Image (cartoon, rainbow, N blue to C red):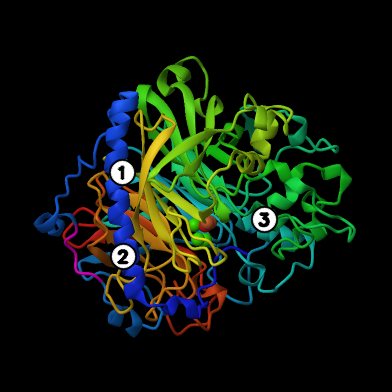
C-alpha cells in the first residue's frame, strides 16, 4: 500500500551518479533552452506574453545566502541520533503540538490517548480525538493573525497494527476505531506566553469516515453516485494533501480510497472501471468490508459506494456545523493535493496530481471570475473545465480538456458526470502523459508550477518529462501555463532530479520528494517520503530556484515521513508533521514520548520557528 517502503534499498540506486548528473544537467540545459524558444514562439504565434524566467527576488550567485541563510543539519549529525528523535537546524527550534489521540477540543470530557500499548481508544472516543496519519494542513488565521488560527489537519491513514495493535479487525467496533482515526481534524490554536497550544472553539471538530457529506458539481445526484440501498452520503478517507480557497475554506484530497474496500463474495471481480482505480477483493488489508457492508464491493445494496470516494472535499474551518462538500468538477482519481491559484481574469485554477505510477497531472479552471461567481451564489469549484497534462519532448505541453463534447469521450461515456466519475479512464483516452507518481504541486511567485514526482520503480522507458527508467528517487518538474494559468499550452523543464543531481555523500542528498511549497520569495521547501540514502531519515530541505543550494532544515524519526506545510501569514511560524513515526513500532522510536519508553509512537504536528524570530527558510 502506498509508499512507506523506507526500508527498501534498491541496488539500482547505486548506479554511477556522475553519469546521471551529466545526463540530467545537460538535459536541463537543453530544456531550459527550448523553454526560452517556446516562450518566444508563444509571443509570435498567440500574442501571449509568456514571461521569461524573471521576477525572482533571488539572483544568481551571492544573493543565495540572503534567500537561505541557515546552518543545515549535516548527514553525520542526523545519523548520530539514530532516528530516535527529530533534529532541526541549530538556527531553528521546534515544539511538538498535536499528536494522535489528543483531544480535538480541550474542554471535551473524552479521555485522551497517550500511546499506552495496553489501552487504546474506543471507537466513540477516537471520534473526538485527533486522528492518525497526519498529512496536509492549512492554518486559517483568526483574530491576531500571526498568533491564532484554525488548523485543519488531514489524517491520511493508520495501519491496523498501529491503530488497533493487531493486523486485522475482530469486530465492527475495531473497524469504527480505524474509521474514526481517518479523516480531518479542525482545531483552534493560539500562541500563549510564547507557546502554541490548542484552545477551545465551537468550530473545532473531527470529520471522519462516517461524517455526513454532500456532493456538488456536475456529478452530484448522478445514478453512479447513488446506491440501491439509498444510503446517505458519508465520510472522507485517506486524506492526503490539501489546498485552500481564496474565500477561506479548506480542501482535503482523497488519495488511496480503493484500499479500504474489499469483497466478501469470493466470486466478485472488478469492473474495468474499478480495476483502473485499483479495487481488489482484499484492498490494503484494513478488513473494513468484513464488518461494515458499506465497504463490501460485492454487497448489492451498496453498489456505487466506491464511486463516492476519490474526490476533493471542501470544509469550512470557521463554521463547525457546515457539512463537508465533495466537489465533483475536480474529477475522481487518487487526489494527492489541490494547489489553488487565481489566474487571469480572476478565474480559479487548481493544480492536482494523481499519485500512482504512470498516472497524470490535472488542472481545473473555473468558468468565470471567482468573486463574481460567488456574488451570484455559485461555487467556483462547481463550474469549470478539467484538463489533463500532456508533456511533449520539446519542452512544451498541452492541457487536454476532459469534456463530453470531445467525440473520443462521447463514444465511451454517457455524460459529463461519467467523465468525472471515471476521470482516469477519460484521461487515458486523450493520451495524457504517464508520470512518475505526481504528488504535491506549488505555484511559485513567478508563475512556475512545481510538482513532485516521487519515484517510479516500474518505469522501463524514459521520456523527456520522466527521464529515468527506473526512477527510484524521484524528480521535480515545473511548468508555466500561458494566459496566466488559464491557457491550454505550457512550457516546462525539470527543476531537479532528486538525489542523483548531487551524488551520494553530498550534504544536499535527499530522495523521494513529496510535500512541496514554494514560498513568496522563491524558496522551495521539499519534504520527503521514502528511502533516503546515507542512513538518513525522511527530511525537509529548503532549496533555491536553481536547485543548487539545498539545505537540510529538519530530519524526522525512524520509519516516518515528513509531510504537511502550514504557516502564519508572516511566515515566521511553520507547522509540519511526522507521519507514521516508527511505522507504529515502539522499538524503533517512542516519539513523541521519551526515547527510552515503551509507548506507541504517535503522528505529531511540530511548530517550527527561527531562534532569531526570522522568516522560515531564511
Ligand atoms: Fe498521500 Fe501520495 O501521498
Ligand atoms: Ca504518505
Ligand atoms: Ca504525499
Ligand atoms: Ca508519498
Q: Which one is in front, 342 or 316?
A: 342
Which residue has dot 2 on it?
A: 94
Residue 31, percent from left and from top: 32, 50
Q: Does the segment drawn in magenta span residue 242? A: no
| Mark 3–mark 2 distance (CA, rounded to whole Å) | 30 Å
Position of 198 with respect to 113 (left or right) is left
Disc 2 secondary structure class: strand
Q: Residue at x 62, y 44 (%)?
A: 428
Q: Nearer the viewer, mark 3 or mark 1?
A: 1
Q: Which of the marked residues, 2 or 1, is nearer the chain's N terminus?
A: 1
Q: Which mark is residue 179?
A: 3
Q: Which mark is residue 35?
A: 1
Q: Are marks 2 and 1 in contact (CB under 8 Å)?
A: no
Q: Which residues are magenta?
A: 68-72
Residue 472, percent from left and from top: 48, 69
| Mark 2–mark 1 distance (CA, rounded to whole Å) | 40 Å
Residue 18, percent from left and from top: 32, 74
Mark 1 CB within 8 Å of ligand 3: no
Crowding near the residue tagged with mark 1, few <14, some 14–19, many ≥20 C-alpha atoms within 10 Å: many
Crowding near the residue tagged with mark 2, few <14, some 14–19, many ≥20 C-alpha atoms within 10 Å: many
Quick check: can you spot residue 317? no
Mark 3 CB within 8 Å of ligand 1: no
Amino acid at each position: 500500500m502506498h509508499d512507506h517502503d523506507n526500508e527498501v534499498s534498491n541496488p539500482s540506486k547505486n548506479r554511477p551518479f556522475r553519469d546521471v548528473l551529466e545526463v540530467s544537467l545537460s538535459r536541463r540545459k537543453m530544456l531550459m533552452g527550448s523553454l526560452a524558444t517556446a516562450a518566444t514562439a508563444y509571443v509570435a504565434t498567440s500574442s501571449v506574453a509568456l514571461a521569461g524566467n524573471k521576477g525572482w527576488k533571488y539572483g544568481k550567485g551571492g544573493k543565495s545566502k540572503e534567500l537561505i541563510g541557515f546552518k543545515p543539519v549535516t548527514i553525520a549529525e542526523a545519523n548520530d541520533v539514530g532516528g530516535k528523535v527529530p533534529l532541526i537546524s541549530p538556527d531553528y527550534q521546534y515544539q511538538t503540538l498535536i499528536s494522535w489521540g489528543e483531544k480535538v477540543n480541550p474542554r471535551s470530557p473524552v479521555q485522551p490517548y497517550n500511546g499506552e500499548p495496553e489501552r487504546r481508544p474506543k471507537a466513540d472516543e477516537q471520534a473526538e480525538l485527533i486522528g492518525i496519519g497526519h498529512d496536509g494542513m492549512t492554518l486559517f488565521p483568526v483574530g491576531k493573525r500571526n498568533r491564532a488560527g484554525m488548523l485543519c489537519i488531514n489524517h491520511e491513514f493508520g495501519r491496523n497494527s498501529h491503530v488497533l495493535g493487531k493486523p486485522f479487525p475482530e469486530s465492527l467496533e475495531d473497524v469504527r476505531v480505524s474509521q474514526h482515526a481517518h479523516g480531518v481534524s479542525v482545531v483552534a490554536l493560539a500562541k500563549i506566553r510564547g507557546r502554541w497550544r490548542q484552545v477551545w472553539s465551537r468550530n473545532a471538530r473531527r470529520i471522519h469516515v462516517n461524517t455526513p457529506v454532500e456532493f456538488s458539481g456536475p456529478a452530484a445526484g448522478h445514478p453512479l453516485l447513488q446506491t440501491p440501498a439509498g444510503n446517505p452520503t458519508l465520510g472522507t478517507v485517506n486524506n492526503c494533501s490539501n489546498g485552500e480557497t481564496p474565500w477561506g475554506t479548506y480542501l482535503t484530497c482523497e488519495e488511496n480510497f480503493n484500499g479500504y474496500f474489499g469483497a466478501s463474495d469470493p466470486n466478485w471481480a472488478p469492473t474495468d472501471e474499478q480495476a483502473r482505480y485499483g479495487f481488489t477483493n482484499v484492498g490494503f488489508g484494513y478488513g473494513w468490508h468484513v464488518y461494515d457492508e458499506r465497504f463490501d464491493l460485492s454487497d448489492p445494496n451498496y453498489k456505487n459506494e466506491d464511486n463516492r470516494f476519490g474526490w476533493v472535499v471542501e470544509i469550512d474551518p470557521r463554521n463547525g456545523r457546515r457539512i463537508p462538500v465533495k466537489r465533483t468538477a475536480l474529477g475522481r482519481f487518487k487526489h494527492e493535493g489541490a494547489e489553488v491559484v487565481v489566474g487571469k481574469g480572476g478565474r480559479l485554477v487548481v493544480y492536482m496530481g494523481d499519485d500512482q505510477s504512470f498516472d497524470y497531472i490535472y488542472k481545473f479552471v473555473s468558468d468565470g471570475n471567482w468573486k463574481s461567481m460567488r456574488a451570484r451564489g455559485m461555487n467556483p469549484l462547481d463550474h469549470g473545465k478539467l484538463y489533463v497534462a500532456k508533456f511533449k519532448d520539446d519542452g512544451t505541453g498541452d492541457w487536454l480538456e476532459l469534456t463530453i463534447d470531445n467525440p473520443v469521450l462521447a463514444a465511451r461515456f454517457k455524460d459529463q458526470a461519467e467523465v468525472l466519475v471515471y476521470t482516469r479512464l477519460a484521461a487515458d483516452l486523450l493520451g495524457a502523459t504517464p508520470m512518475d507518481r505526481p504528488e504535491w504541486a506549488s505555484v511559485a511567485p513567478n508563475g512556475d508550477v512545481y510538482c513532485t514526482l516521487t519515484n517510479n520503480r516500474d518505469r522501463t522507458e524514459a521520456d523527456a518529462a520522466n527521464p529515468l527508467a527506473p526512477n527510484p528517487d524521484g524528480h521535480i518538474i515545473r511548468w508555466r501555463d500561458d494566459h496566466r494559468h488559464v491557457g491550454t499550452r505550457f512550457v516546462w523543464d525539470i527543476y531537479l532530479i532528486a538525489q542523483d543531481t548531487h551524488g551520494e555523500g553530498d550534504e544536499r542528498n535527499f530522495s523521494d520528494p513529496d510535500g512541496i511549497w514554494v514560498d513568496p520569495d522563491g524558496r522551495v521547501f521539499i519534504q520527503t517520503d521514502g528511502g533516503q540514502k546515507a542512513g538518513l531519515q525522511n527530511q525537509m530541505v529548503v532549496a533555491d530556484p536553481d536547485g543548487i543550494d539545498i539545505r537540510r532544515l529538519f530530519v524526522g524519526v525512524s520509519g516516518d515521513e515528513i509531510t504537511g506545510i502550514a504557516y502564519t501569514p508572516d511566515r515566521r511560524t511553520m507547522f509540519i508533521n511526522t507521519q507514521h513515526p516508527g511505522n507504529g513500532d515502539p522499538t524503533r522510536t517512542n516519539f513523541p514520548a521519551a526515547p527510552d519508553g515503551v509507548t506507541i509512537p504517535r503522528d505529531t504536528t511540530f511548530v517550527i520557528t527561527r531562534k532569531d524570530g526570522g522568516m522560515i527558510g531564511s
